[in-house]
Amino acid sequence: MEAREIFLVVTGANKRDVVEKLYQENGKTSFEPADLKAHRMVNVILDKEAAAGLPEDVKAYFTSRFA
């Protein structure tokens, strides 16, 4: 990827499973969003519905230190 910075905006309750899968995947897989984790500057923004019901470790991983 040539982008210096990536912003991934996730909205809606039906995205919870995708967010959790993104957290759990590592390396090259058939799950293309997991490739984003290899980039050095990715910002994942979740709305309340997308974050609702996620395990605490997943929430902590995606929580900004500046929020």
Image: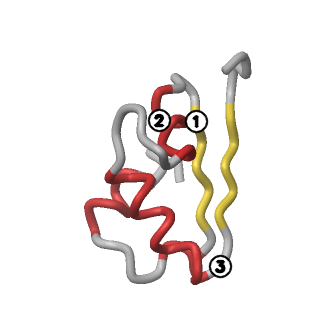
Q: As drawn, is 31 to the left or to the right of 56?
A: right
* Residue at (39% x, 82% y) in the render: 53
* Residue at (38% x, 52% y) in the render: 23
Q: Which of 3 and 43 is in front in this view?
A: 3
Place of residue 1 in the rendered image (x, y in percent of width and height, measured from the top left): 66, 21
Position above or below: 55 against 57 = below
The three-letter code of the residue at mark 3 reads: Gly
- Marks 1 and 3, how far apart at CA: 20 Å
Q: Do the residues labelled 2 and 1 touch (CB within 8 Å)?
A: yes
Position above or below: 5 against 58 = above
* Residue at (51% x, 35% y) in the render: 35
The three-letter code of the residue at mark 2 reads: Lys
Q: Which residue bears the numbered disc 3?
A: 12
Q: Which residue bears the numbered disc 2?
A: 37
The three-letter code of the residue at mark 1 reads: Val
Q: Which of 7 and 35 is in front in this view?
A: 35
Q: Which residue bears the numbered disc 1?
A: 42
